[in-house]
Image (spheres, rainbow, N blue to C red):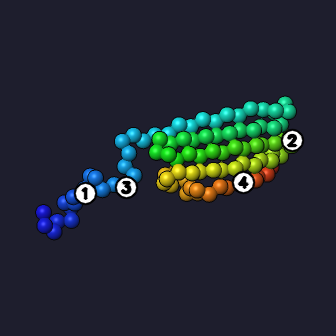
Amino acid sequence: MGGNPLCIRVNPNSFYDRYQYEGFFQAALQTDYMFGKLQPRVTMILGFDGVYAFVPAMTYRVNDNLLLGANWVVIEGRRAGLGTFRASDMVQVRAMFQIN
């Protein structure tokens, strides 16, 4: 085995954040108000390893062509497996104009 680069040995106990079980739970709740003009929504993602994300969002339909929206993204946890923006909140505001 000496200097053969194709025979690589890895210690099976040297992995960082190794868990016996991996997985996550995701749920989204959305409803309509004002005859469908106002649509609040909340999305939650919970990981078995302690990572969670919480995304409340709101969309307002001004008319059939113009939608205004805002959301707040929160990602927390011990490691950045869920996203790049771990441990920092992010607010997004958007205006969408649809050309039919």
Circles 1 and 2: CB distance less than 8 Å?
Answer: no
Label 1 Cα crowd, 10 Å radius (few <14 / some 14-19 / many 20+): few
Along the viewing direction, whichever of 81 and 94 lies nearer the viewer: 81
- Label 1 vs label 4: CA separation? 43 Å
Which amino acid type is marked by label 4? Gln
Residue 80 placement, left or right of 59: left
Per the rendering, the mark at residue 10 is: 1
Residue 96 seen in render: no
Identify the residue at horizontal 85%, vertical 33% (top origin): 34
Neighbourhood count class around disc 3 (C-alpha, 10 Å): few under 14, some 14–19, many 20 upward: few
Residue tagged by mark 2? 63
Q: Earlier in the sequence, mark 2 or mark 3?
A: 3
Q: Earlier in the sequence, mark 1 or mark 2?
A: 1
Rendered view: 54 above or below 1? above
Badge 4 element:
strand
The amino acid on which the numbered mark 3 sits, given as a three-letter code, is Tyr
- Label 4 sits on residue: 92
Relative image position of residue 33 (x, y in whole percent): 82, 32
Q: Classify mark 1: helix, strand or loop.
A: loop
C-alpha span from label 2 to label 3: 51 Å
Nearest to viewer (mark 4 / mark 2): 4
Q: Provide the residue designation for mark 3.
A: 16
Residue 97: where, in percent of width, then height? Answer: 80, 49
How far apart marks 4 and 2 lie (CA) works out to 21 Å
For the residue carrying disc 2, how many other residues have a C-alpha within 10 Å: few (<14), some (14-19), or many (20+)?
A: few
